[in-house]
Image: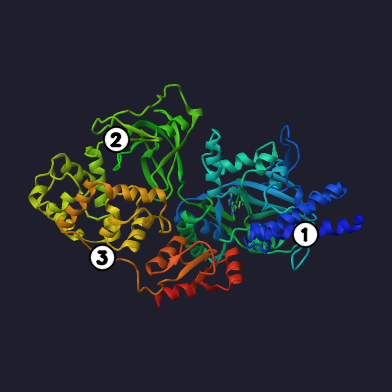
Amino acid sequence: MTISDSLKRIEFLREEITRHNYLYYILDSPEISDAEYDRYMRELEDLEKRFPELITPDSPTQRVGAPPLEEFGTVRHTIPMISLQNAFTEEEAREFDAKVKRFLHTTHEIEYVAEPKIDGLAIELVYEDGIFTVGSTRGDGETGENVTRNLRTIKTIPLKLFKPKSGAIPRKLEVRGEVYMKLGDFNRLNKKREAAGGPLFANPRNASAGSIRQLDSTITADRPLDIFCYGIGVMEGPKVSTHWEILETLKSLGFKVNPLIKRCKNIEEALTFHKEIEEKRESLDYEIDGVVLKVNSLRLQEELGEISRSPRWAIAYKFPPRQETTRVINIEVGVGRTGALTPVAIMEPVEVGGVTVSRATLHNQDEIDRKDVRIGDSVVIQRAGDVIPEVVMVVTSKRTGHEKSYVMPDRCPSCGAHVVKEEVVWRCPNVSCPAQVKESIRHFASKGGMDIEGLGYKHIEQMVDKGAIKDSADIYYLIKNDILGLERFADKSAQNIIDSIEKSRNTTLPRLIYSLGIRDVGEHTAKLLTKEFGTIDALGAAKYDDLIKIREVGPEVAKSILAFFAEERNLKLIDKLIKGGITYEAEKTNKGGPLEGKTFVFTGALKGFTRDEAESLVESKGGRPTSSVSKKTDYVVAGEEAGSKLDKARELGVKVITEEEFASLTRS
Ligand code: IVH
């Protein structure tokens, strides 16, 4: 091959690889197999080895490779990277809109672009004639650090821009965006660090910032970073008049722009969008801390200008934070229904995610040691959705030297039995331990279980302490007089409890299974077991092989179920419950539902449902949601920005339907 042939081939390969990178990483819909991609990449590497003079910085082979730096240089941003003012309530967001209108002397509605506010690290990327030249952190807004080499390692950052269908590549372009880490990647990274004995990152934002600020770019290359681009500094070339057009331009040049952006006619639509995104927050695989509202018209943006280093034309309408800092006042040990002892940090109350929190789990002694949590420490705590708040890390810089280390007692704090240590879990082995009994009754009566309304932990505690009940089944043998004997019970409240107990007698099999408190069997597994076995007796008679063949039931769960039914005590309890008048619908599968026997795969963002809601809906109508497309899939439901699953469906000839068609199927 002549050098000119080689050059042609090299150029072809670079273009193809860049295009496939884009299809794979940004559109999530690869056109070629990984093996084919690797072949292209290897061929390019070989050619570049033979002709090193043909290597250019925008070649896909050039993402990593330079030796570590001594320190970062600095980069002055052509246009300062200013930050946003915050709104924390709907009222404040409306006030922002009102101010915009006042400033513009208008009563007309203002069009906004609403975007998720990504919780990561702000960066700027500079392109000259379509080639990535410099990348920097925000720094103090005027000057940032030169982290070009590290940013080059992020596969979703183009090294060379696409030529858009209409118009040319901007001669100079400064793009702004947020580097972040997906939650799954973050958890995997922390697990790896834990296994290696390294310090953990408190959250994906810290992990992203830590990864970008590495002097050795090979370390950054190993970190699963990603980016969403949301704005520009200088752009020479394309004529745009709205922020929406800027985002469209960025997309067409090959940048990754968040698919959950919305053009809103007025502030009302923007507020609704904020609510929708807040609901979706839990199901996203990256962290967001609010929604940014931006006046869409660039002319109006210019007119509005800035005030105290923030634009008047944008606002960050924040969600309640999920992490907070507070102080550990004490550490107590709780005993769960299976006897597991859990250390709990008792803390100065603090609001996290809209809820006041004063207790957070420390999981076990290993975790206390690993995080080195001491009484008196300032700690970062976090809560997400319904998850129990947990202590993430200690703020060691706030230590005074008066903090006290903590070791869990080796006797059960409830019954005094010697604790048995099973790997990281410490357990009280006494099955009649009052704490265990109370906890299993609490679980039994809980919402997901027998759902005995009004029977709270305080009541259960008294009933057990006074000997009125010894196990869950005893509840169904209580008479009003037993309850009247307890503190703070009048005739009416006692009758209410008796009525709730009565009401709960007629239940469903998933509730009954869940209420038994079988280790590893939550509400979801209880439903699976119901579908498979139909009666409690059939479940009790199940063999290991019967259990393991159920999708989603693994060896651990199967063993826990077998162990439960192997205990005479538990069989007696079930018997006592049935004799106590419990009835349940023998079979609570959703046979006969409109989606019976059909499997569904969801891809892309749905508008009307979260992924969980859509999947539960399928189940409730008798169908089965699955995660990957195969020939056996009946329907692929394609939302916005549907990815590779959609291509796979088309390839296999699987029926693809829209969200609306799906909704109407569930109603038929
Ligand atoms: S716009 C002048 N859009 O939030 C406008 N910022 O203070 C500047 N952020 O550090 C920012 N997602 O890194 C904008 N969709 C988004 C964003 C976003 C995250 C970060 C940004 C900045 C901070 C705002």
Mark nearest the camera among 1 and 2 is 2
Quote the CA–CA distance across marks 1 and 2: 64 Å
User: Crowdedness of circle 3 by 10 Å Cα count: few (<14), some, many (20+)?
Assistant: few
Query: Residue under circle 2?
Result: 428
Is residue 200 positioned above or below 185 on the image?
above
Relative horizontal placement of residue 226, taking residue 573 as reference (left or right): right
For label 2, being within 8 Å of ligand 1 is answered: no
User: Crowdedness of circle 2 by 10 Å Cα count: few (<14), some, many (20+)?
Assistant: many
Q: Secondary structure at mark 1?
A: helix
**Front residue of 634 and 259:** 634
Residue located at (38% from left, 47% from top): 355
Query: Residue under circle 3?
Result: 586
Residue 308: percent from left, percent from top: 60, 45
Q: Secondary structure at mark 2?
A: loop
Residue 115's disc is: none
Relative horizontal placement of residue 309, taking residue 393 as reference (left or right): right
Residue located at (91% from left, 54% from top): 3
Q: Secondary structure at mark 3?
A: loop
Specify the farthest residue to the left. Answer: 481
Residue 20: percent from left, percent from top: 70, 60
Residue 15's disc is: 1
Mark nearest the camera among 1 and 3 is 3
Whether residue 170 can be seen here? no
Quote the CA–CA distance across marks 2 and 3: 35 Å
Residue 655: percent from left, percent from top: 54, 74
Residue 390: percent from left, percent from top: 41, 40
Which tag, 1 or 2, sits closer to the chain's start? 1
Which tag, 2 or 3, sits closer to the chain's start? 2
Amino acid tagged 3:
Ala
Residue located at (78% from left, 63% from top): 168
Whether residue 242 can be seen here? yes
